[in-house]
Image (cartoon, coloured by chain):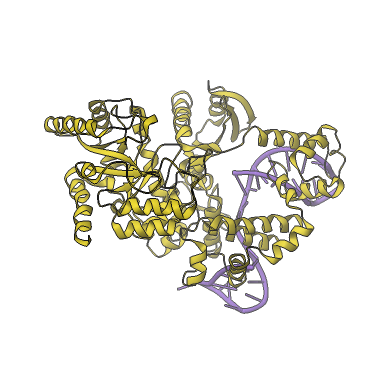
Amino acid sequence: MENRKVARFFYDIASMLEIKRENPFRIRAYRRAAQNIENLADDITKVVVAEEKKIPGIGKDLMQKIKEIIDTGTLQIYEELKKEVPPGLLELLAIPGVGPRTAKIIFDHYGIVSLDDLERACLAHKIQGLPGIKGKTEKNILNGIQLLKTGLERKPLGLILPLAGEIIEALKKRSPVDRIEVAGSVRRRRETVKDIDILVSSSRPKRVMEVFTNLPQVSDVIGKGETKSSIRTRDGLEVDLRVVEGDCYGAALCYFTGSKAHNIRIRELAVRRGLKINEYGIFRGEKRIGGKEEREVFEAVDLPYIPPELREDRGEIEAAMEGKLPELVELQEIKGDLHVHSKYSDGAATISEIAEKARKMGLRWVAVCDHSPSLKIAGGVSIEDIRKKRKAIDAFNRTSSDVKLLCGTEVDILSDGTLDYPDEVLRGLDFVVAAIHSGFKQDQALLTSRMVKAMENPYVHSIAHPTGRILAEREAYALNLEEIFAKAAETGTCLEINAYFKRLDLSDILSRAAKNKGVRLTIGTDAHILDQMEYLNLGVFVARRGWLESNDVINTMGYEDLMQFLRKKRKDEGKTR
DNA sequence: GCCGTTTTCGGCCCGACTGTTTTCAGTCG
């Protein structure tokens, strides 16, 4: 999508203006615009052409600049700024502890524009002695560079949640906490997170800090104070703990949950009402008028409660004002998993083990989707074996009343867009999810046409991991998503939210875009071992962050309704054929 | 540069911490 490219221009302009010490509010305007463009569910190019939708934070001037980027591929003001502020200088801003002021001073004196050059200069002690910089700052810069190099990168939520849970349980058990919750991006369920924020209320904060900094998971104590301590875990993750008084727990929870952009909007609303909101409560003048519960913060600015997953300033404030917040799908509403592998292909579990696991998780049905023959490396199921699987699943279903299995497949979309099983075979299956596993490097038109062709098949119910991206490993393949969404809506094909912790594909933003185009979503864990079925919650988090309601997600259907729904596409297609 | 249930001009979120400072600037979340 173009959105990220356009946003990049504005982010860079903001940084360059910052280095030039321009008007801070102008800088903020560029940043906010960049963020809003990045978070836009629709293609910015289309929005600009249509001119019907107002993007918050983008007025006449910035709209003109977006047009310029789309038309010419660049921006005049950007090119001019680049002459004054070399792009390399922006890299230095990525170092924790180095802001625009420090970067500028270093550049002005030594012309340094790269991490390596700055590291050498620090080691040679050439940085201390510059105006406002002494030994300690120099050392901090070095630490910052080190941190940046050794991976300050974000980690997948799925890996972090269990750790956050462990720490919270340990604190509950061993220290005098009254209330305790995870905050920050973990609470907002972002797909990746940089650190874990935990909020506690306690009458004995010192004791809580003591226990926290001595947990077995701790490798270093970064800082330890009365109200805030930070540690690094053995796998290099930073965990911040904050302790507040019970009376301001709600205000603090809001504050530490963020996002920052969301908080700013809420506080702006407070200012207009003559109020002040901070982490210590809600204030009218000097007088505290609330803050014990999170709900009070929203009430103070005349808004309904906004779930943490929506707090990204992606339109949730406006929606809340108009009473149009979505009723987000809940984990408890999910009746089954639409993508699990069994021993028939490369999964580790038998169908009865899968059903037993589903039973334990409180699910009512599971679609067992094994690979098709061309995916030899994953033990693709031959046509002969698929008949055996059909019989085994039918036999299982006859004896099981509480959990049902669907005989499914994850059929390969071959490089010419045909499917890896003939229609006669697909017709005999309950659920068909189609996926691209080869030819990732094909050009956009070809990849898109493969997927479109698959969706036109009346037996294909959903497309697995539609963009192919893998967090921190592989970019999405080149697809025309506008076309994919339109075709999905037209043919009644669903798109998958793959809940495997490294995929989460579709993403939150794309799920929302798909929904807006009239597409329904399926959630599948893509589990290859039983434990991975528990990633189902990650899929729900993506759905919630994508503003999806229960009706948008097929997994909320009971078994009978689901089977009826799955048969429907075939009939509808049959009519038009 | 945006934006308006006090405003089309004059505002624009809030506080903590750190390092460098004799009262504050820079950075961060």
Above or below — where is A495 with respect to A70? above
In the rendered image, what is the letter of the chain coloured purple? B
Residue at the image position 47 percent from the left and 71 percent from the top: A50
- Looking at the image, which residue sits at the far top? A216
Above or below — where is A530 with respect to B5? above
Residue at the image position 67 percent from the left and 57 percent from the top: A14
- Looking at the image, which residue sits at the far left? A398
Return the x and y of residue A361 as percentages of the image width and height. Answer: 28, 32
- The answer to whether A211 appears left or right of B21 in the picture is left
In the rendered image, what is the letter of the chain coloured yellow? A
- The answer to whether A132 appears left or right of A468 in the picture is right
Residue at the image position 35 percent from the left and 33 percent from the top: A527
- The answer to whether A153 appears left or right of A181 in the picture is right
Quarter of the C terminus of chain A within the rendering: bottom left
Residue A234 seen anywhere in this rendered image of the structure:
yes
Return the x and y of residue A222 as percentages of the image width and height. Answer: 64, 30
Q: Quadrant of residue A31?
A: bottom right
Residue A305 seen anywhere in this rendered image of the structure:
no
Return the x and y of residue A259 as percentages of the image width and height. Answer: 53, 49
- Looking at the image, which residue sits at the far front? A416
Front residue of this view, candidates A34 and A455 = A455
Front residue of this view, candidates A507 and A204 = A507
Q: Quadrant of residue B13?
A: bottom right
Return the x and y of residue A68 as percentages of the image width and height. Answer: 62, 68
Above or below — where is A100 with respect to A395? below
Q: How many marks?
A: 0
